[in-house]
Image (cartoon, rainbow, N blue to C red):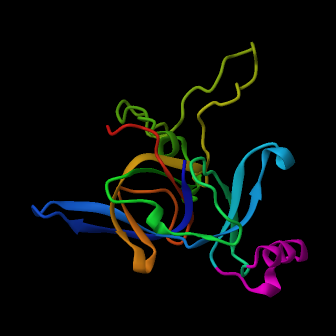
Amino acid sequence: MKEILGKKIGMTRIFHEDGEAIPVTVIEAGPCPVVARRTTEKNGYETYEVGFGVRRKSRVTKPLTGQFKQAGIEPTQFLREVRYDEVELEVGGSLKVDIFHVGERVDVSGISRGLGFAGSMKRHHFQGANKTHGQSDRWRAPGSIGQSSYPARVFKGMKMAGRMGKDKVTVLNLEVVKIIESENLILVKGAVPGHRGALLKVRKSNRSRL
């Protein structure tokens, strides 16, 4: 298990040697300084706390300021926990994009774009009613949502209109197409969740190639 934090730059395409166009997402991954270590004896589990980005010192709380000072690093914009089972990291060290290699499979997690309030057809891909026989007011209606006098309520989880997006999404088994170590960039094949500039977590996938 190895993970790193990154920022979504955007999407583009690169060309294979045979001329094939490959759609890729550009992610700025790292450098991520190691701020603290969580141990089984003290915290009940094994993990590392790493940072990403730059943050002004005036915007950091005093407890976090002391934590950064103890680790000997500058304050970061984000703090997240990552898992490393095979290697032991040193507090004050740094994770860089070179922990991955071309051809490796990764899982990318992030918060999807918020789309606001959406109807049932857009949110759940409902087909809608027939556009014939005078049903002009029911084309995009959700239809029946429950029973009559019993149980006289709507069950939880019913697919209805509501807030769409802004959920944690993980895209699995993406291929690492290219790595640019000088600019801390990793290019993965396909799309990943979030808007441009969104925080992402890239981890080694434990799934075989599909």
Above or below, comparing residue 162 to residue 14 in the picture: above
Magenta segment's dominant SS is helix
- Nearest the eye: 95 or 199: 95
Asked if residue 200 shows in the view, the reply is no
Res 24 → quadrant: bottom left
* Stretch of the chain drawn in magenta: 54-72
| Furthest residue toward top | 150
Q: Quadrant of the C terminus?
A: top left
Identified at 75% across, 15% down, the residue is: 151
Identified at 59% across, 34% down, the residue is: 159
Q: Position of residue 157 (x, y in %)?
A: 66, 31
Identified at 56% across, 73% down, the residue is: 31
Identified at 40% across, 34% down, the residue is: 134
Q: Is residue 69 magenta?
A: yes
| Furthest residue toward left | 18
Q: Is residue 72 left or right of residue 197?
A: right
- Nearest the eye: 192 or 130: 192
Q: Position of residue 13 (x, y in %)?
A: 27, 67
Q: Position of residue 150 (x, y in %)?
A: 74, 12
